[in-house]
Image (cartoon, rainbow, N blue to C red):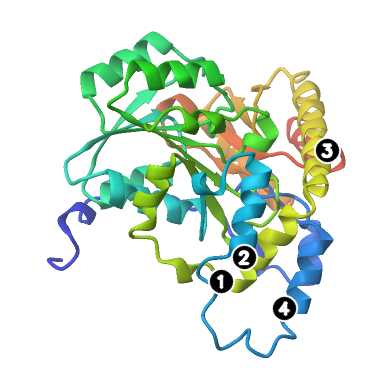
Amino acid sequence: MRFPNKYLRNIKPYKLASHAIWSVKPEERENVLKLDWNEATIAPSPLVKQRIEELLTQPDFFHLYPVTHNEQLLKRIAVYVGLPEENVQYFASSDALHEYICKVFIGVGDPVMILGPSYDNFRLTCQANGADVFFSEFNTDFTFNAAKFEKDILDKEPAVVYICNPNNPTGYCHSVDYIEHLLQTFPDTLFLVDEAYSEFSGVTAKDLVLKYDNLLISRTMSKAFALANFRFGYLIASKENVQFVNRIRNPKNISTITQTAAQAALEDVEYMWDYVRATKEGKQWFIADMNTLSQLHVHESYGNFVLVQLTSYEEKIALIQYLAKKNIFVRDTMQSPIVYNCFRITCGTKEQMKQVAEQIKSFYA
């Protein structure tokens, strides 16, 4: 086919997880545990539904474009982040933000380094825009080798380095001090730190954007805030970098429903923090309970997920298929050979994780 751009002709697509839940009748979905996309396992704050119901009564809602500069929403984000409004901007998902970042900061042929294994959609976005993507991998036991990683940066001289922090799927989390070390050591390299799971880790490099212009931070409200279906994300960066992205950002692409949902969720952050606490409790219970089994190992994680390591690829596939038959969907990890014998499972409340543990134990019974 001669029409697609040459970078797409041999590109490896981003592999989607199962969406079997949408083939299940709505009234039966309560019996399904969709734990494959790291979404929240509960609904968002009730304030979100209330505000949307109010929105639907407004006569001008349906036929007008969304507001293109939502000052109230920007203020809410800035207050939540604890930075000036000039250091934040919102987007129709962090994926959309990543696409803008590629357009603004990455040119055709530019080297881009990803600390892997990692969220694979960013790799696809870069390659589709003509970038040369390289990976610097964690150790086979999922520990991090700083010396190797920094040597890879020196060798490849990437224009951009992508770090998911905490890492998806290993759960490893870099300290803010280490992120600052990278910014100081490589001042001519732009670091994109994906903080999709920062609420669960309690670690954020946000304050560093006031000191360094080679740092971009992307965030989403799909995880801790439970707004995955609304597609909302935001950028944290220096004033100058925010302004650069704004030059090409399409401000009417964030729907009024999405803006309303995000603002409502930010008005009830305690609801979110209650869910984060419940998820962390469920995660730690699950790790401890599962690691009493000799057939698998569940790795510690700073995200709302864990990586489950099996003895073989065949056993992994068998367990994934068994759980699917029990209406529990988990994520196969195939981004790198070091995770071929693993799958990733989103963690929910302790009660939800007990259901998962029961089925895994029945598989080995």
Camera-nearest label, 3 or 4? 4
Q: Earlier in the sequence, mark 2 or mark 3?
A: 2
Q: Residue furthest left?
A: 2
Disc with the residue nearer the chain's start (1 vs 4)? 4
> Do the numbered discs 2 and 1 sit on residues whose CB atoms are within 8 Å?
yes
Q: CA distance from mark 3 to mark 1?
A: 30 Å
For mark 4, give the secondary structure. Answer: helix
Mark 1: which secondary structure?
A: loop
Image position, residue 181 (x, y; %): 44, 15
CA distance for labels 2 and 4: 11 Å
- According to the picture, the residue beneath numbered tag 4 turns out to be 55
Disc 2 element: helix
The kind of residue on which mark 1 rests is Ser
N-terminal of the pair, mark 2 or mark 4, is: 4
Inspect this view and state whether residue 340 appears: no
Cα distance in 3D space between marks 2 and 3: 26 Å
Residue pointed to by mark 1: 255
Task: Report which residue position mark 3 lands on.
Answer: 278
Q: Earlier in the sequence, mark 3 or mark 4?
A: 4
Where is mark 2, residue-wise? 259
Badge 4 amino acid: Leu
**Residue at the (23%, 55%) spot, across then down:** 8
Q: Where does the N terminus fall, quadrant-wise?
A: bottom left
Considering depth in this image, is 182 or 11 the residue closer to the camera? Answer: 182
